[in-house]
Image: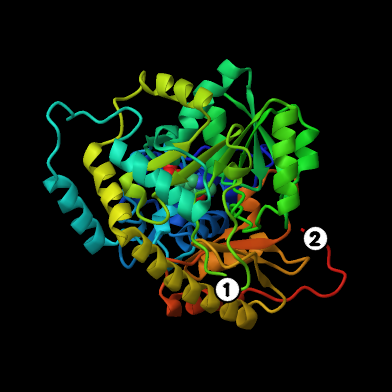
Amino acid sequence: MALHFSVPVSRNSGESLTAQIQRFIKQEIQRGTLHPGTRLPPSRSLAVDLEVSRSVVVEAYAQLAAEGYLEAVRGAGTRVRSHLSREAVVPVLLDEGPVPPMRWDLRPGSDNAPGLPRREWLTAYQRALGAPRPRGTTRPHLAGEPELRGELARHLGRLRGVSATPSGVLVVGGFAQALTLLCAVLPDLGVTELAVEDPCHPGQRRFVRDNGLRVVPVPVDDEGIDVDALAATSARAVLVTPAHQFPTGSVLSAARRDALVRWARSVDGWIVEDDYDGGLWYDRRLPGPLALQRLAPERVVYAGTASKVLDPGLRLGWLAAPEELLHRLLHVRARHDLGTESFTQLALAELLRSGLFDRHLRRLSQRCAVRRRSLEDAVRIHLPGAAVRGPAAGLHASVRLPEGTDEAALVAGALRRGVLVRGGTAFGTARNRAEPALVVGHAHLPRTGIAEALHAIGAGFSRPGPGSRRR
Ligand SMILES: Cc1ncc(COP(=O)(O)O)c(C=O)c1O
């Protein structure tokens, strides 16, 4: 059977023919033009049609098969893998689009969170549903249900040292909505640029840009964001992850915290504190840092989310913001929706009130501590010379690779062995060169999975010799 397949290839594009074929097929699968199960022409006939050598097509097909996009079916040729059904592409904050399923997926992100404590959630939800509600309050409050705002103010004060009254708390649909609202409000305050940490979550950079602000990347080191570098920019607002920098894991030092607040006051600016892993701290050597917001509640917007410690599907987040900003945020929100779904809010309020949330957090910390130790052991064995960076906290850790390690080759090799892991480069911008690293989401994995995945990664690792150049 002659299968027709149009692949545009150019001989003077500067890109190899194999790479062009590979990129085109991948793009068409991601677009949904090439459907799961679609048969592709045999390499020989496609090579004839494209007037290229057969090895060009064979190599492109092989690479796409290794990445999980294609499969060779005995007697039926090469097909688009049948499980790659297209997902709706929606503009969510941290969405990367469909990726091929792997034996181990180590990407950090809330989709890899260990998940909702179902029994506790069910109890809390049932209580919330059963509680009598005053008549005429069936629509959610725009700022959030008073029960939840009260519980959050108490909880955040106790656990994170956040200084907020219930009326200073705004319940939102996850950090994504918090960021959208902030991006809409900041220009009214004369702020059109948002400085972000470099590296940070690439989805956040894109999100801020798509919401109309200019993104200003500022380097991060072992003490967190470089405040001198920030002060050298023209930005008057910054988005930071001070408790556990995403993705490097560093903690913003006390000196930098003071400097950051001084900077905000001096430029009449704003700090957005993304406390995404919500005080999940299990490092026995050090006390966990409190929120930055407590140092300057009039300058810092504190943002928390249920996505990591409970479940990203809840779409629940919260802000503690200075009054001036809170009013503006509410005003903008009133143009977009009518508030966050009530019963989910009431269930979270009940979870917090009853102590079930604290119990869950304790269990989650214990689970993560065990995963972290397994990761440290596996790194020692399979990646000699590498080290897990930062305190034991959160759902992920950054692994610093020895100077000179070819990070891209290590990541590609891992992929071929069924492990999807992100290198540090995936999170940074070209402006600030990142040291070689792997960013490992560990909380969702079985302990044996961590060892197995690191074994597979380590199979492609050779410790660089002295004097090897950074790549
Ligand atoms: C750095 C960072 N901030 C915030 C979030 C949470 O976003 P949301 O609350 O919209 O799910 C995530 C989730 O992956 C994250 O990685």
Q: Is residue 467 left or right of residue 415?
A: right
Instruction: Give the x, y percent position of residue 29.
Output: 40, 45
Is residue 97 among the parts visible in the rendering? Answer: no
Find residue 470 and name its label. Answer: 2
Give the mark toward the camera: 2 or 1: 1
Count of marks, rendered view: 2
Residue 419 screen position, x and y as percent: 49, 67
Mark 1 neighbour density, 10 Å: few (under 14) some (14–19) many (20 or more)? few
- Amino acid at circle 1: Arg
Along the line of sight, the residue nearer the viewer: 170 or 3? 170
Which of the 4 quarters of the picture holds residue 194? top right
Q: In terms of image quadrants, where is residue 15?
A: top right
Is residue 398 left or right of 75 when viewed as pictured? Answer: right
Up/down of 290 relative to 88, above or below = below
Secondary structure beneath label 2: loop
Note whether residue 202 is visible: yes
Residue 78 bears which disc, if any?
Answer: none
Give the percent coordinates (x, y) of residue 412: 58, 62
Q: Residue at x 50, y 22 (%)?
A: 184
Which residue is pictured at 40% across the width and 32% down the height? 167
Q: Which residue is mark 1?
A: 284
Q: Is residue 94 left or right of residue 312?
A: right
Q: Residues within 10 Å of mark 2 (few under 14, many from 20)?
A: some
Q: Does mark 1's beta carbon lie closer than 8 Å to ligand 1?
A: no
| Tag 1 secondary structure | loop
